Amino acid sequence: MPCSPSFRDAVASGLDSVTSRLLGKEKDDSYWNLPEELKCPISLDLMRDPVIVESGHTYDRTSISEWLDSGHCTCPLSGQKLPRQPPLIPNYAIRSLVSQWCDRHNVPFHLNNAAAVGDDTMNMTAAFLVGKLATGSPQVQRQAAYELRLLAKRRTEIRQCIAEAGAIPFLVPLLSSTSDSRAQENAVTALLNLSINDNNKALIMAASGAVDAIVGVVQQGGTMAARENAAALIFSLSVVADYKVIIGSKPAAIPALVTLLREGNCRGKKDAATALYNLSVYKSNKDAVLKAGVVGMLLNMVLDRRDEKESATVIDDTLALLSLLAGCAEGLEEILGSEKPVIPALIDLVSAGSDRGKENAIAVLTAMCHSGGEAMVTRLAESIIPLLQMVASTGSCRSKRKAASLLKLLRARPTQSPIVNR
């Protein structure tokens, strides 16, 4: 027998209040919309003890310590290799901003409320919400997915509790919801937040129909936010080498991401580019990306930088993907076959791009030299050596290193024939 509207409203309110109790405070929209610069890139939580690692990126001390203790030896954001026991340098500037933000929004600075909650409470809350996902009406399921979406942003322990309560197999069917775009968006975002935990990646990949459903959201999600988050979820899952193969084997996966790269807004293009980059590390996927005509699309994005906002948020990731594709003969052929002034545009980015833009533009040129052999090295050496010398002296840490590497390659004037493929 269908539930009455009043009962459904009561259940929805109950879900809301349970989450409020778990967090130890009434939900405040400003708390959920934390400034990005104050969030730890690993936990997505407020950084109460921000520290800088050797790559220059800032993380919460607990999160980066857990990452390193679990056997990782690279910076999560940049992939740069870190020393075995890297120094964690306090970031007092960010810490001061966090303290000011906490004072302004009446949030405790020294205590993470979620961390103070006992395991029993977290387990009970997760089980309650999963029960509503399993048996509730569509409205209750949407609300439960929303609450799980918010909770999964918080901490590793909560994400683990949600997964252990069995949420993932019940979130996956909501991805195919064509009549309720908000339920779909809540479900895919909850899965994205859960996927931050490595163990949860395996559970998502093992859920029946999950990969096809995620690809379907990228392809024709009910909201642009759902499509973006589905692309970000593919990026998160494809960090695992085996999952690159599984996702890339889905016929619709790469075309769906290519479509989002072409049609999406700034964030959608960025998420599509990063997902395609991760997948393209595997050679068969790289071949499929090349066949989809991505190189021409990327070149257009690099060359047409009239939208300054897009230039700042998308071009850097576009260049990263282009550097990967330029490292094989087919990719280089497409780049050089363009009638547009590609090399001058890349040189311009080395000269006047953002720090990350300089790094990635140099990476593209380096990849072109590796795949193009002596002819490409000679062509670049005539026009870029003075600029690279300047970047090697005055650029960021990473751009200095990349510029020095390319300078060494250009000065060596290799005589070997071009690489056929990589």
Image: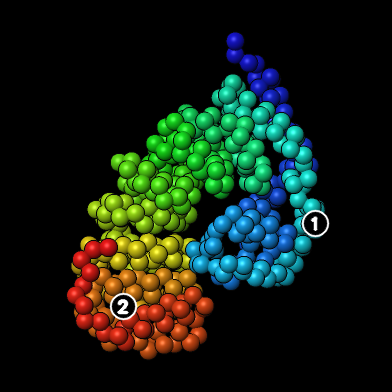
The structure residue drawn at horizontal position 47% and vertical position 47%, both measured from the top left corner, is 237
Indicate the position of residue 258 as horizontal and vertical percent values.
34, 51
**Which residue extends farthest top?**
1
Residue 8, position as x, y percentages in the image? 66, 22
Residue 186 x, y percent position in the rendering? 55, 38
Q: Is residue 12 visible?
A: no
Q: Residue at x 35, y 70 (%)?
A: 364
Quadrant housing residue 50:
bottom right
**Rendered view: 190 above or below 379:** above
Note whether residue 122 is visible. yes
Which secondary structure lies at badge 1?
loop
Label total for image: 2
Q: Which sits earlier in the primary sequence, circle 2 or circle 1?
A: 1
Of labels 2 and 1, the one closer to you: 1
Q: Which labelled disc corresponds to residue 48?
A: none
Q: Which residue is mark 1?
A: 110
Disc marking residue 344: 2
Is 367 situated above or below 35?
below
Q: Mark 2, residues whose alpha carbon is within 10 Å: few (<14), some, or many (≥20)?
A: few
For residue 156, side relative to residue 422 (left or right): right
